[in-house]
Image: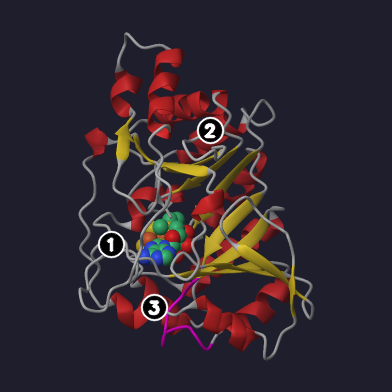
Amino acid sequence: MIDPFGRRISYLRVSVTDRCDLRCVYCMAEDMSFLPKAEILSLEELDRLCGAFIGLGVEKIRLTGGEPLVRKNVISLVRSLGARLGSGLQELTVTTNGTQLAKMAGDLHAAGIRRLNVSMDTLDPARFTAITRWGKLEQTLDGIFAAKAAGLAIKINAVALKGVNEHEYDQMLAWCGEHGFDLCLIETMPLGEISGDRTDQYLPLSLVRARLRERWTLEETDYSTGGPARYYRVRETGGRIGFITPLTHNFCESCNRVRLTCTGTLYMCLGQEDAADLRRPLRDPSLDEAGLQQAILEAISRKPKGHDFVIDRRHNRPALARHMSVTGG
Ligand code: SAM
Ligand code: SF4
């Protein structure tokens, strides 16, 4: 699949549920309303849709959410997608908040998953609960170490929040180095109404990187996970640190991904409203796999050149009404 700007689309992110067991302040309001269950694709439908994408050249699939591991029986989807590894699909991964990992890590590994992104913005228990509203740090840490023990490679994702976790990155970098995890810092993106002011939370990672360099030797690398993060090798720990900077650096030129929601809506760009409904062709009994693939190709032909996120101090409105939990980041 080649989009109108010559970019090869090989990466599909699938939000398997919009629900979550946490309420991170930058992601959701506390009283979120979720999609009615009837609108949500079954796990079999999601598998079939992923199969159509793989047939069109998708090599990497990431399951995300909401919290993907709270969807009932999600492991059956992981297994059916895992069975597609090797024939077109090269990698299957998950982004999770870690709360369910203590019980699921072994099954994820057995199904073919080798790498996980776990979101954890702080190592301080009280701050963790303040950020996630409903979370307990210990539960996420137990999950992370269960995943490590199961043989999964782990990258810790942390959203950089001004005045909240900004003095912790040295400690988090050292902790990740000690346990063999990569660390990836993410700038806050203006998605969805949340209670609070996002301009207060926004912390440019160019500043964070400069501060980290006072203590750590960050060596340029061309390491890439096929995503927008820019990685450095940390000489002192041997680990890696990545920075995702949608607001300070426009990374759209090399975008290789599209995002599918649990209702079968395909977003061609995280930062634009345009979307394609794939549930209708998926459920249309007159359409076979080729018909479904035609609908996918039509959507790819509308992939925009880039996003136009901006955090505007005068108009404290999200750039997009959609929450990150719809498309999964
Ligand atoms: N629940 C899973 C988790 O937290 O990893 C997967 C879904 S979550 C929406 C995916 C990632 O998006 C997380 O790393 C989260 O921190 C990040 N995220 C959520 N809202 C964000 C925002 N407004 N700006 C930047 N990152 C955000
Ligand atoms: Fe849930 Fe992930 Fe959003 Fe936090 S960032 S509320 S864990 S979906």
Three-letter amino acid code of the residue under disc 1: Ala
Mark earlier in primary sequence (1, 2): 2
Image quadrant of ligand 1 equals bottom left
- The residue labelled by disc 3 is 202
210 left or right of 15 in image: right
Q: Which portion, as a residue range, is magenta?
A: 159-167
Which mark is nearer the camera, 1 or 2? 2
Residues at marks 1 and 2, CA–CA distance in whole angstroms: 27 Å
**Residue at the front extreme?**
5
Q: Quadrant of the C terminus?
A: bottom left
For mark 1, does the 10 Å Cα neighbourhood hold few (<14), some (14 to 19), or many (20 or more) residues?
Answer: many
Q: Secondary structure at mark 3?
A: loop
Three-letter amino acid code of the residue under disc 3: Tyr
- The residue labelled by disc 2 is 2
For the residue pair 285 and 211, the one nearer the viewer reads as 211
Which mark is nearer the camera, 2 or 3? 2
Mark earlier in primary sequence (3, 1): 3
Q: Position of residue 164 (x, y in %)?
A: 42, 84
